[in-house]
Image (cartoon, helix red, strand yellow):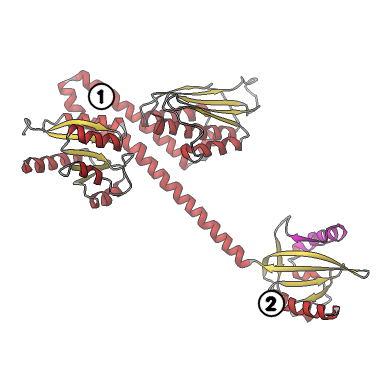
Amino acid sequence: MTLSAVQLNLNELFNVMVDAVIAFDIHQNILYFNRGAEDIFIYTAGEVMGKPLTMLLPARYARIHRAHFDHFLRSPVASRAMGERSPIFGVDKNGREFPAEAAITKINRDSEVLAVVIMRDVTQRKHIENELRRQAEQIAVANERSRLARDLHDAVTQTLFSASVIADVLPRIWERNPVEGKKRLEELRQLNRGALAEMRTLLLELRPAALMEANLHDLLKQLVASITSRARVHVNLRIDNGIALEPDVKVSLYRIAQEALNNVAKHSGASEAEVVVISPPAAGDAAPLKRCVQLTIIDNGSGFDTTISKPTHLGLDIMRERAAAIEAELEIRSQLGKGTTVQVTVPC
Amino acid sequence: MPAANPVRVLLADDQLKVRSALRLLIEQELAFNVVGEAGAADELLRGILKAYPQVVLLDWELPGLPDQHKIDSLRLLDPQLRVIALSGRPEARKQALAEGVDLFVSKSDPVDSVLKALYFIHDKVQHAV
């Protein structure tokens, strides 16, 4: 086959492509415009031949395109995908702007340099991508809501139910035995305090901004009260009241403590647990917010075999993600029958 | 009240505070006797074999129960067993009744509903004797 026959075949090939194929010289004057380009841009080849390529771009991109193009001509790279720096757009004869994907190639022919762009209108795909993203967000919101509803049922409802049962029988008990009555009243008070703490913990999930605003001492105090109410485990909290951490560190530590204490309440069967936060003392009142801090959660429960536990189990992957996000080290030590220790260390 | 022959009740709920409150409530009634407590499905099955309850106050979300046919294994142990399902989720009512519980009480209903349900079962059990 002769070279001209190959060229002829290439021309036929370009004309059955749905993608736009546009060739132009170093001054960006259009030399070739295939049928796909005619379909996408609505111009006929005759209308654009010899005219500047910028007529196919939104006006605001003309200058940056010129700069990118000159840079490409000088670079040793023979071809590259366009739009790596920012998404690219085309504009058709009717002025409709559309998102596009394109690749550009340089061809050195005799002493001349040609550039060929292959381009595709991705309006439809972008539309589907946006729709998928929107649906994924909706599903995430729905999942989050049903998780909250479940937590409300599992925590607050149980506590309030217990409280209302006791309140219901209390008058009769008091009449017969005031000492027993007082004991039950104290139980009722504790249940109510617990319900309040559980409620506040759940409200934080509804308004995550509140997490950013509150200090770690108050957050952990409330979390501990909420766990104590849900499970009969005594949790001791040790933390400086004045500790001031950067918000991302604070939120991650709270989330890790939340997962660890959930495990203590749900799976460990522990009777005692301790939450300890250690941080070097601040250098005065006006000291900047800190990162270096260590959080430890210890329980005396049943423990688990760390070598066989799946990461998704026990929220271990959530804890790892949270720790990685603040460049902290997470250590989980556990042995069957010997309790569990979760320790997060954020280096200074 | 046939106090000489109280109905035997077993409490099944994973939360100690709920069991403790229910026990307190039921202990005020001479017509009933709390014969056991269970915090999970395995304890419940053992409790049925050991304490011969006539009725179980069953938390519908008791850990260890299957998602469906929750009470089949209980009735296998004792076909006469009466079950009152208790749940914090009112929407569980339909499934619970379809699976054959005698009565369903939502934990957000007035406390009276628990006693009413127990007395309803009490009358059935006494008539059956």
Q: Is residue A39 visible?
A: yes
Q: Give neighbour class at mark 2: few <14, some 14-19, many 20+ (Cα, 10 Å).
A: some
Quarter of the figure with the N terminus of chain A? bottom right
Please tell me how crowded label 1 is: few (under 14), some (14-19), or many (20+) other residues with Cα within 10 Å: many
Q: What segment carries the magenta color?
A: A61-82
* Label placed on residue A184: 1
Task: Name, please, the residue furthest toward the top.
Answer: A179
Q: Is residue A232 left or right of residue A208?
A: left
A252, B58: nearer the viewer: B58
Which residue ends up furthest to the right in the rendered image? A111
Distance from Cα at disc 2 to Cα at disc 1: 81 Å
Q: How many marks?
A: 2
Q: What residue did someone put label 2 on?
A: A39
Q: Is residue B36 left or right of residue A30?
A: left
Q: Secondary structure at mark 2?
A: helix
Tell me the chain of label 1. A
Which one is earlier in the sequence, the residue at label 2 or at label 1? 2
Is residue B10 visible in this depiction of the protein? no
**Residue A14 x %, y %:** 74, 76
Residue occupying image coordinates x 51% and y 53%: A137
The amino acid type found where label 2 is placed reads Asp
Which secondary structure, mark 1? Answer: helix
Nearer to us in this view, A208 or A276: A276
Q: Is residue A85 left or right of residue A302?
A: right
Q: Establish if A262 lies above or below A107.
A: above
Q: Which quadrant is home to the C terminus of chain A? A: top right
Expressed as whole percent of the image width and height from the top left, the position of residue A187 reads: 29, 25
- Badges 2 and 1: C-beta atoms under 8 Å apart? no
